[in-house]
Amino acid sequence: MSKLNYIFKRLGLFYWRFVASPEKYARHIGVTIGKNCFISTREWGNEPYLITVGDNVQVTRCVSIHTHGGGNSIRKEHPDFDMFGKVVIEDWAYIGAYAHIMPGVTIGEGALVGAGSIVTKSVAPHTVVAGNPARVLCTTEEFYEKNKRYDVGTKRMSSEEKKKYLLSLPDEKFIKK
């Protein structure tokens, strides 16, 4: 009987880690998530119950959210040392792919965290940050003003409609670096 229990337990872990949607997995392990979010990461650290995600938030792929760290380096002298920080991602925030959010950080309402950023300090509402460590680049309104010429209005289109439309656009409608 115990072997059968072991198999079912392993299948359950497999389901939650790899089959369930990233959002369902996050909720299952204890992340508090608001309404209408797009969650694409499965990297919630060892204390997911210390993470709160607001409404209408996008957390894209391979984002890592950390709630603790650094303690092992001093445990020889202080064996019970442990420290934690809650992470809060407020409504309408966007976290780009491969970003790392460190313990104790709050990402403010409507803030944008650029892909690959290491966020070591809280981000004010409606602010764009990027880099390692992440630094303030501009407000989200300034970001919009700089980029509105590239707005193609495809957000509510189906995949096929979007593909057809994008392939019909002139090159000047696309971002160039």
Image (tube, helix red, strand yellow):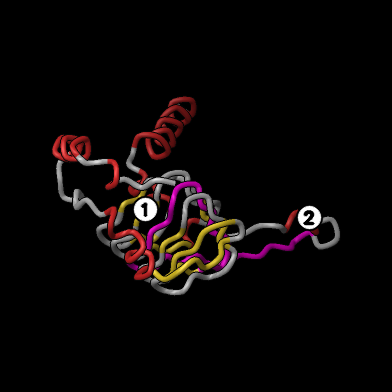
Judged by its main secondary structure, the magenta piece is loop
> Measured along the vertical axis of the image, is residue 24 above or below residue 109?
above
Left or right: where 147 falls relative to 7: left
Callout 2: SS: helix
The spot of residue 28 in percent (x, y) is: 38, 50
Which residue is at 56% across, 57% downward? 131
Amino acid type indicated by mark 2: Ser
Which residue position holds label 2?
Answer: 73
Q: Quadrant of residue 117?
A: bottom right
Query: What range is drawn magenta here?
Result: 79-105
> Measured along the vertical axis of the image, is residue 167 above or below residue 37?
above
Which of discs 2 and 1 lies nearer the camera? The answer is: 2
**For this rendering, which residue is in front, 48 or 5?**
48
Quadrant holding the N terminus: top left
Q: Is residue 106 magenta?
A: no
The spot of residue 160 in percent (x, y) is: 16, 35
The spot of residue 51 in percent (x, y) is: 46, 62
Q: Is residue 94 magenta?
A: yes
Which residue is at 29% across, 41% downward? 171
Left or right: where 6 falls relative to 69: left
Checking the image for residue 27, the label placed there is 1
Among the two numbered marks 2 and 1 on one chain, the one whose residue lies closer to the N terminus? 1
Q: Quadrant of residue 143?
A: bottom left
